Amino acid sequence: AQKITQTQPGMFVQEKEAVTLDCTYDTSDQSYGLFWYKQPSSGEMIFLIYQGSYDEQNATEGRYSLNFQKARKSANLVISASQLGDSAMYFCAMREGYQGAQKLVFGQGTRLTINP
Amino acid sequence: DADVTQTPRNRITKTGKRIMLECSQTKGHDRMYWYRQDPGLGLRLIYYSFDVKDINKGEISDGYSVSRQAQAKFSLSLESAIPNQTALYFCATSEPQAGTPAREKLFFGSGTQLSVL
């Protein structure tokens, strides 16, 4: 069974608009972590934001925020005031459990294109 | 200089050839990982290592082997490459976060694009 599902293969957004990238996850663990990574066309993977399963508040990092809805098992990434440099692939990932190696399970990714 | 360096950046090889992808890091992290990325599938874990003496299989280890030569070096080998091993390969490192272990971030190299003909 797919543990991380990103249902939007591609999204097109006008510059300066807010954008929400969807992510749903499946786990029976009570302790888990959710991550978003950005992959620009240059190929490297860049960490954006983290949300722990016990965190009561939604995580924020600058223009990035994570809309965490635990009951729905969703962890959507919100980018406010999008910029041309936000055009990239975005991956949602999950870590089950809080101990041991960082064995992340990744979703299929969403390709975001920001139009001027 | 990059903290996590992968060599080569690109490699084209033929079916049946042995090939090694190398990773070195200057972050001082004990934990190192190899992932592969295929279009439409995201990243999948091949092997990971807690330290020089502790190496573990990931989700898709068949057809691969690894060597942890030192804390800073972690190599991935394809003993007999096949076309479906064509992918983008990433090395990553991490270090436990005291007090918030789950927040441990992966630091990725720039990737090696491997093509097996």
Image: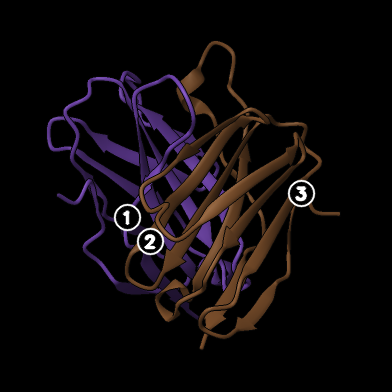
Chain colours: A purple, B brown
Q: Residue at x 18, y 40 (%)?
A: A26
Q: Which class describes the residues within 10 Å of circle 1: few (<14), some (14-19), or many (20+)?
A: many
Q: Residue furthest bottom?
A: B117
Specify the label residue A107 is tagged with: 1
Label 1 SS: loop
Task: Report, in whole angstroms, how far the alpha carbon at label 1 lies from the one at label 2.
Answer: 5 Å
Is B27 on the left-hand or right-hand side of B101? right
Quadrant in the picture for the N terminus of chain B: bottom right
Q: Position of residue A53 (x, y in %)?
A: 31, 24
Quarter of the view holding residue B50: top right
Q: Which residue is mark 3?
A: B24
Q: Which residue is mark 2?
A: B42
Rendered position, B69 above or below A82: above
Mark 1 vs mark 3: in front: 3
The answer to whether one can see residue B69 in this image is yes
Q: Are marks 1 and 3 in contact (CB under 8 Å)?
A: no
The chain that hosts pointer 3 is: B
Task: Report, in whole angstroms, how far the alpha carbon at label 2 lies from the one at label 3.
Answer: 23 Å
Q: Position of residue A80 (x, y in %)?
A: 44, 54
Rendered position, A37 above or below A75: below
Mark 2 vs mark 3: in front: 3
Residue type at the position of mark 1: Gly
Q: Are marks 2 and 3 in contact (CB under 8 Å)?
A: no
| Lower sequence index among marks 2 and 3 | 3
Residue type at the position of mark 3: Ser
On the same chain: label 1 and label 2? no
Rendered position, A50 above or below B23: above
Quarter of the view holding residue B62: bottom left
Q: Residue furthest top?
A: B99
Q: Are marks 1 and 2 in contact (CB under 8 Å)?
A: yes
Residue type at the position of mark 2: Gly
The chain that hosts pointer 1 is: A
